[in-house]
């Protein structure tokens, strides 16, 4: 069965600093990979997804993620964090029928 | 605007009440999902409907009863809930069951007293 690990429960970065959120997955075949963001009291918004092709994918709000098959990772990055990026971020892996989510990483941005 | 709406946004109910959560998607999708999000736990998939037929039921207690009258609407009927059922209930839709990208609604925050 597929699984997703987000090793960092909380991350705090300064506004303007770079960000990397880690995601590792376990899946036998080529996975579908997603990053979602959730602001307090809101649903999940899709940031980006990887199905195939170029392993560096661009998303909304200036985010990108890189699929590394050898490391079973799909880390999310942003070169310069804004205060509005404070939220909870979820990595998910799908096999086409269902999504399995990681436990989430809460991002705090300090000014 | 995600194209998926949920009502009510907040609900407080007693253990003996009966209530319903509503989800509507405006994306022309064929598959709809109910998830439960509890504090400090990963999202749990509860039910999946594809073309108005239930295709997945992940061992959810019978006090939760889903209904999908058409491909745009999904309900979750609640009765005799327990305090541990307090959570954020999220609805999602995708173009088809098996098409990986799911789009989520804002959720209903349920509190069971």
Image (cartoon, coloured by chain):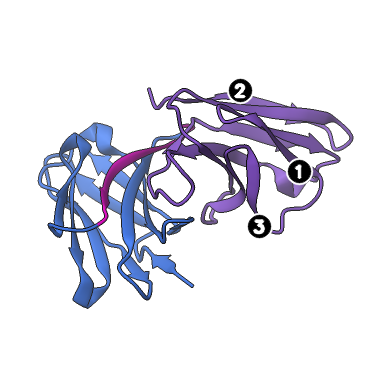
Chain colours: A blue, B purple
- For image coordinates 39% across by 27% down, the residue present is B2
Q: Nearer the viewer, residue B7 or B55?
A: B55
Q: For the point 76% across and 41% down, which residue is it?
A: B65
Mark 2 touches mark 3? (CB < 8 Å): no
Mark 2–mark 3 distance (CA, rounded to whole Å) = 23 Å
Marks 2, 3 in one chain: yes
Q: Is residue A46 magenta?
A: yes
Q: Which mark, residue A6?
A: none
Circle 2 packing at 10 Å, graded few (<14), some (14-19), many (20+), is some
Q: CA distance from mark 3 to mark 1?
A: 11 Å
Residue B6 rendering spot, x and y as whole percentages: 56, 26
Q: In the displayed structure, would residue A28 be above or below residue B112?
A: below
- Give the left or right position of residue A105, taking residue A21 as reference: right
Task: Determine whether, in the image, residue A64 is placed left or right of residue A3.
Answer: left
Identify the residue under disc 1.
Answer: B64
Confirm whether residue B16 shows in the render: yes
Residue B72 at x, y = what percent? 55, 27
Disc 3 with disc 1 on a shared chain? yes
Which chain contains the residue that carries disc 1? B
User: Magenta part of the protein: which range?
Assistant: A41-51
Circle number at residue B7: 2
Question: To which residue does mark 3 refer?
Answer: B58
Mark 2 residue element: strand
Q: Residue at the right extreme?
A: B16
Residue B25 lies in the magenta stretch: no
């Amino acid at each position: 069965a597929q699984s997703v690990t987000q090793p960092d429960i909380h991350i705090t970065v300064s506004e303007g600093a770079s960000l990397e959120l880690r995601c590792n997955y376990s899946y036998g075949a080529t996975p579908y990979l997603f990053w979602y963001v959730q602001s307090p009291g809101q649903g999940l918004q899709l940031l980006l997804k990887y199905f195939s092709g170029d392993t560096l994918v661009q998303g909304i709000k200036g985010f990108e993620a890189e699929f590394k098959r050898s490391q079973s990772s799909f880390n999310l990055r942003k070169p310069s964090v804004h205060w509005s990026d404070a939220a909870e971020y979820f990595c998910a892996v799908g096999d086409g029928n269902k999504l399995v989510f990681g436990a989430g990483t809460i991002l705090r941005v300090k000014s | 605007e995600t194209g998926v709406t949920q009502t009510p946004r907040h609900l407080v109910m007693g253990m003996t009440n009966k209530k319903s959560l509503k989800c509507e998607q405006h994306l022309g999708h064929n598959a709809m999902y109910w998830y439960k999000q509890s504090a400090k736990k990963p999202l749990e998939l509860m039910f999946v409907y594809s073309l108005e037929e239930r295709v997945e039921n992940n061992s959810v207690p019978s006090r939760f009863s889903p209904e999908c009258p058409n491909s745009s609407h999904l309900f979750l009927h609640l009765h005799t809930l327990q305090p541990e059922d307090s959570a954020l209930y999220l609805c999602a839709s995708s173009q088809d069951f098996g098409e990986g990208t799911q789009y989520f609604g804002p959720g209903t925050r349920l509190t069971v007293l």
